Amino acid sequence: MKRELINQCTVRFPALSRNESLSRSAAASFALQCDPTVEEIAAIKTAVSEAVTNAIVHGYRDCEGMVEMTMKLYGDNTLYIQIKDKGRGIPNVKEAMQPMFTTAPADEERSGLGFTVMESFTDKVRVRSAEGRGTCVTLEKRLRKKGDGD
């Protein structure tokens, strides 16, 4: 069954660390049309922050590029957020999604928990990547409908 698309928006920005906060704000603002809880907004912002930070820090290490974030809202109150880069890509996605795995140089403080954090704050995380072509991370979170659990 095809889901009913209610709204969508795409934002493109340079892969600069200062734009991580832009991505968080854009995702939170887009989600507001669902009247989410404070906890849901915090979860969305955290997951998006991790995905965008990965694109900036790992995808475009030592080079410039753009990050594209597409947000969609479906009739079942599912928020879909896709973060794409055209950076270096991930050689082994399965390995990269393991807790504590990182490709960051030893002199950088990186925990290797980005994908784990994304998974803990959303309902679904999908990662597609190809070396030298970039990475696409898709996050899905079903937001509580007004009146559910109140």
Image: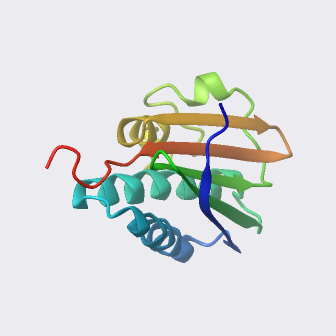
Query: Can you give x and y, in whole percent of width and height, for residue 58 in the image?
Result: 64, 51
Q: Decide if residue 108 is in sight here.
A: no
Q: How is the image coloured?
A: rainbow
Is 21 placed above or below 3 here? below
Q: Quadrant of residue 19?
A: bottom right
Compare residues 137 and 7 and report the one nearer the observer: 7
- Total tally of numbered discs in the picture: 0
Q: Quadrant of residue 119?
A: top left
Is 48 placed above or below 103 here? below
In the picture as drawn, the residue positioned furthest to the left comes out as 150
Q: Is residue 44 left or right of residue 79?
A: left
> Residue at the location (78% across, 47% down)?
134
Query: Can you give x and y, in whole percent of width and height, for residue 34 in the image?
Result: 39, 61
Query: Can you give x and y, in whole percent of width and height, for residue 7 in the image?
Result: 60, 63
Q: Is residue 40 left or right of residue 119?
A: left
Q: Quadrant of the N terminus?
A: top right
Q: Quadrant of residue 2?
A: top right
Q: Is residue 4 left or right of residue 77?
A: right
> Residue at the location (61% across, 34% down)?
126
Q: Decide if residue 6 is in sight here.
A: yes
Compare residues 44 and 53 and report the one nearer the observer: 44
Query: Can you give x and y, in whole percent of width and height, for residue 109 in the image?
Result: 43, 51
In the picture as drawn, the residue positioned furthest to the right comes out as 132
> Residue at the location (39% across, 41% down)?
117
Compare residues 44 and 1 and report the one nearer the observer: 1
